[in-house]
Amino acid sequence: MDISFSPEDLAFRDEVRAFFDQAYDADLQARLADKASFKEAVIDWQKRLYAQGWIAPNWPVEYGGTGWSSTQKYIFETERSSRGIRDVVPFGLQMVGPVIYAFGNDEQKERFLPRILSSDDWWCQGYSEPGAGSDLASLKTKAVLEGDEYVVNGAKIWTTYAQYADWIFCLVRSNSEGKKQEGISFLLIDMKSPGIKVNPIHTIDNHHSLNEVEFNDVRVPVANRIGEENKGWTYAKALLAHERTTIAGVADSKRAFDEVCRRAALEVNAGKRLIDDPLFRKRLSDIEIELMALEFTELRVLATVASGGAPGAESSLLKIKGTELQQAIQSLNMELAGYYQGVLDNNLSAEQLGHEFGSDARQSFMYGRAATVYGGSNEIQKNIIAKAVLGL
Amino acid sequence: MNFDFTEEQSMLRDSVARYVQDNYDFEARRAIAESTEGMSREHWQNFAELGWLSVPFAEEHGGFGGSTVDTMLVMEELGKGLVLEPYLATVVLFGGLLQRSGNSALQAEFIPKIIDGTCLGAFAYLERQSRFELNDVQSHATASGDGYSISGEKVLVFNGANADHLIVSARTAGEQFDQQGISLFLVPIDAEGVTVTSYGMMDGQRVANISFDKVAVPSTSLLGLEGEAMALIEAVVQHANVALASEAIGIMGQLNAKTLDYAKTRKQFGVTIGSFQALQHRMVDTFMAYEQSKSLLYRAVCELEDQADSAAATVHALMVMIDRSGKLIFSEAIQLHGGMGLTDELDIGHYAKRLMMINTTFGNGDFHQAAFNALRYA
């Protein structure tokens, strides 16, 4: 058992720090914070990571990965999050990319992977449907083969950033007979195709990131199907496992937790700092202790992966605990904001308003409810553990 | 970065696991628990011959030179079998204090005897008023001739009824709660003025209240510097907490495994109860609690090995989590076993009772959480 950093690891950490200090500059941060320039700023940032060769640490080297050890990945993640730098948009780099290099043909790899790495294509995910949530395999969006094209009809929902996307990867029903998992195909669909319509969904955080995507006689070349027809479920399951290893978000939660501690030293009640209040301190350590454990649970899973093992149902544990902690931290932020937790977005300065973070706390708390729902709800994750780990 | 064990460590763990499996089943344990001494000297000699009693000691004293990892592995396996023999009291506490005391004469005399199984030791630190505060010491030692005279009372001394030697904390200066002024003395149990009153605990241990009435000891029996013992005590207790957490991990793993087995075989309404989602999710919760506790144990062990500044807070965090997870896991184990979970015949309740004792030995969850908060949110 050894978690100490080698001199090489420490040199790597210095290299990462130097890069972030230089590349994540004040101008970029300002553009990321502004809704009007958000998309371009995200792409700009990802292109800087790409130019550095660090855009896809988890990909195999032959497809553009970094070849880092799990310790190096851990260092990179920790340094990233400790600066409050957002993770890359996951849909291309962490979701469809791995499916394409694992199950796509050479032509698909050549066509799509470079543009995912360079962020020239913005991807979104077409899994859930109005009638298919946790029971994803019951999806009904239909793909009928006509010549060398599929004709797609139906609707996808909860599609994050569909309004920005160039491409969508979809699970579609190509066969309605037999087991519902066995008639599903995995299609890559150009968002500019005729017949696609994006309808915004406004969420309880008073923002717009989710959408419904309608497909009306959308024609998709067979060449855009990943792997075999009706085998899409297998590919999607592999992808879901991939999604869940990054979903714990430990490094980001550590940063968010430190911010809560900083704020708790500034918020005063009856002349007493909240960080000195025994009840509030108990709430802090209830979270921090779980987070300290989860960091090592994640390292244990990473170490298993590094030595050739597969991230199995343990990633369900990471998802459940990680999202519970994210929400617990968001709740503490709301407690700290007091009355200000209700403040809507506005153009007032903290000085004019009288408070620094009420609106942010509200937004992340409200949208944060999604975390225990998406990526397979936490109850579904418990079913997975019960079946796969406990053998029930 | 890796969480692998060395070949030597795996062999040590397997040796303990095999012995417990072959020689320490639940009925054998019950017989030992019901015996007068509440432990088996035959097992203890076997532990010595298998080398387990030498694990944490330096090679110069004939020890194995093991690390925190080695002790963790031994304690986890002992926990699985609810082993009653005083490994914690003799090796981790009594031996740990000697090892870290810097008193080479006492080390040379006693560590080899611990290793060969001929010395059973105990650490007498707790007093009836002191609850979880190690520095709340009223027993006192005054200079007398070329030595000291110790008076006072210690309670709940683990292995106090069987030990042949004690290490006793006593005040040589200062007031009741002072950190400074506490000293440690090695006292033979048969010294004049020592009175031992033993009684049993719910986890099968025999403990003792031990009173000291002007017990005369030579100055050579002082461990470390006079009045400076708190740092030594805290360091050893930190390691003892990690050892207890390791034992708890062994127990929690057994409780989860046994409960899962039961859920897969027990039938109600014509199906196994493990097919009910309400129960499945509870077993997932206990699985997660176990894995999280294990992760925090690994973290504490790694930080102690690296002598990281954060280690003290991490050990407190670990003991908070062991307290919470332990209560969750034994409560669910009893609940899922239904009426059977309440019977003395089944081992489930006995695992529960040992977990409960572990979680009060050096402070309960609330105590450790307050200590963690004081370190982290200053």
Image (cartoon, coloured by chain):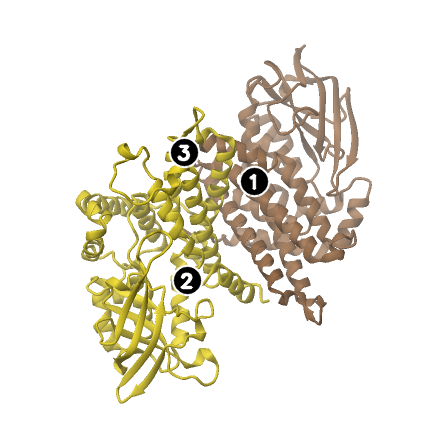
Chain colours: A yellow, B brown
Q: Residue at x 45, y 54 (%)?
A: A300
Same chain for mark 3 and mark 2? The answer is yes
- A275 or B177: nearer the eye? A275
**What residue appears at the point 49 percent right and 33 percent down from the top-left corner?**
B373
The residue drawn where x is 22% and y is 76% is A194
Q: Earlier in the sequence, mark 3 or mark 2?
A: 3
Residue A146: x and y, percent?
29, 88
- Labels 3 and 1 within one chain: no
What residue is disc 1 on? B319
Q: Point out residue A3 in the picture as x, y percentages from the top left corner.
A: 41, 47
Kindly identify which numbered label has been placed on residue A375: 2
The disc labelled 2 sits on which kind of residue? Gly
Residue placed furthest toward the top: B145
A367 left or right, relative to A16: right
Where does the image place residue B346, in percent across and percent down from the top left?
75, 55
Does B46 sit above or below residue A380? Answer: above
Chain letter of the residue beneath label 2 in the structure image: A
Q: Nearer the viewer, residue A309 or A57?
A: A57
Q: In this view, does B254 lie to the left or right of A334?
A: right
**Marks 3/1: CA distance?**
25 Å
Tag 3 and tag 1, C-beta contact below 8 Å:
no
